[in-house]
Image: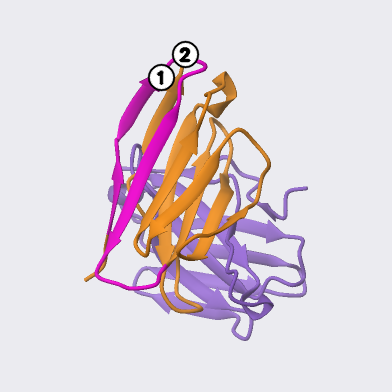
Amino acid sequence: SQTIHQWPATLVQPVGSPLSLECTVEGTSNPNLYWYRQAAGRGLQLLFYSVGIGQISSEVPQNLSASRPQDRQFILSSKKLLLSDSGFYLCAWRGDRASPLHFGNGTRLTVT
Amino acid sequence: DQQVKQNSPSLSVQEGRISILNCDYTNSMFDYFLWYKKYPAEGPTFLISISSIKDKNEDGRFTVFLNKSAKHLSLHIVPSQPGDSAVYFCAASNLSGGSNYKLTFGKGTLLTVNP
């Protein structure tokens, strides 16, 4: 069966520091991968998605970037965190069309 | 512009009764709709989906109804159980729009089922 791993579970970082969140998927090949963010009191906002290695689409211009160095690895990064980057970051994957997104357990990021 | 709206931030029901969670959408291109359940500090878990070619889909205690003319869908949980207490997200996508499958989520409704 397929599983998705996301780490770390919680992270506290100072303003201006770099960020790297990692997500890996097991048990499937060539998944579509997604990064979502849930800010306090808001819904889930799509940040990036990837349909293949090295292929990244950005939905919201911001302080973050994403990379997909391997088929089942998706990384969310920032060179300098802002206070507004605080939130709950979720990685998700999807197999074929019409199948639902499956989410990891998320990373709670607090920028201080 | 919020394309998927869940106008009730919270809902409280008694155990054993029906829970009805509502969702409205504005984008007429949406043709696939999903409901997710989320516990605190966890990722959302897929519950049930419905294609725009149907108006009802049932899975155990969960039923989703779709009214395309009103651009409205609802999730019914019968009977409600305390373990159903969670945030429920409505989501929509345009499947026929190609492989760049993106889900647009509502802000969620917190359901509390009281024993």
Query: Quadrant of residue A22 in the image?
Result: top left
Specify the colour of chain B.
purple
Question: Which residue is identified by label 1?
Answer: A13
Vertical placement of residue A36 versus A100, above or below:
above
**Percent coordinates x, y for residue A40 in the rendering:** 53, 30
Residue drawn at 46 percent across, 20 percent down:
A17
How far separated are the C-alphas under marks 2 and 1?
6 Å
**Percent coordinates x, y for residue B84 in the rendering:** 34, 51
Q: Is residue A21 magenta?
A: yes
Which chain is mark 1 on? A
Please give the range of residues in magenta.
Answer: A4-31
A80 lies left or right of A22: right
Question: Amino acid under label 2?
Answer: Thr
Which chain is mark 2 on? A
Q: Nearer the viewer, residue A19 or B93?
A: A19
Q: Secondary structure at mark 2?
A: loop
Q: Nearer the viewer, residue A64 or B64?
A: A64
Residue B10 in sight here = no
Q: Tell me the orange chain.
A: A
Image quarter where the C terminus of chain B lies is top left
| Cβ–Cβ under 8 Å for marks 2 and 1 | yes
Question: Which residue is identified by label 2?
Answer: A112
Question: Amino acid under label 1?
Answer: Gln
A32 lies left or right of B1: left
Q: Is residue A27 magenta?
A: yes
Residue drawn at 65 percent across, 72 percent down:
B94
